[in-house]
Amino acid sequence: MLVFLFLNFLHKTYNNKRNYFDKIIMKMIDSKNLNINDIPLKYHLDSFNQFALSFEPQNDSAMPYFIHIPISQPLSNLDHVVSIRALLYSIQRILNNRTYESDEFKPKIEKSYQILRLKLQKNRE
């Protein structure tokens, strides 16, 4: 009986860990395949991290059109979806290296989401 309980415990622990890791695996989205539904509705740290990290600069098909984007760049100057995604990726990397949570970039992130949705909507029409 004790062996059965122990094996049952191990099985549940394994399944819980597997479910946990299935949830945190990052989905990579090429800029060509980015969909409006992929963009979070508003800023929340977890959804921002997941979305920003769905961009893989070294493998994105639109990267040849990308030029280094400084974080201070006004959003109005960013004309490509890939440029905005690269900016969000850069912000995520900055926030990831901090030991505290900050809303410093929140307005820029939410504005980026809005611009991305508009660009994708216009491209689909």
Image (tube, rainbow, N blue to C red):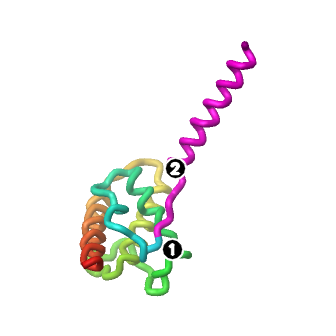
Total labels drawn: 2
Q: Main secondary structure of the magenta part?
A: helix
Q: Which residue is mark 1?
A: 57
Residues marked 1 and 2 touching at CB (< 8 Å):
no
Amino acid, disc 2: Ile
Quadrant for residue 70, please give it: bottom left
Image quarter where the C terminus lies is: bottom left
- Residue 43 is situated, as x and y percent measured from the top left of the image, at 31, 55
**Dot 1: what SS?**
loop
At a point 42% along the width and 48% down the height, the residue shown is: 100
Identity of the residue furthest to the right in this view:
3
Magenta segment, which residues?
A: 1-29
User: Which one is in front, 27 or 3?
Assistant: 3
Residue 24 - label: 2
At a point 39% along the width and 53% down the height, the residue shown is: 47
> Which of the two labelled residues, at mark 1 and mark 2, occupies the earlier sequence position?
2
Q: Is residue 40 above or below residue 72?
A: above
Identity of the residue furthest to the top in this view:
1
Between the C-alphas of marks 1 and 2, the distance is: 20 Å
Amino acid, disc 1: Pro
- Residue 103 is situated, as x and y percent measured from the top left of the image, at 32, 53
**Dot 2: what SS?**
helix
At a point 57% along the width and 46% down the height, the residue shown is: 21
Q: Is residue 49 above or below residue 3?
A: below
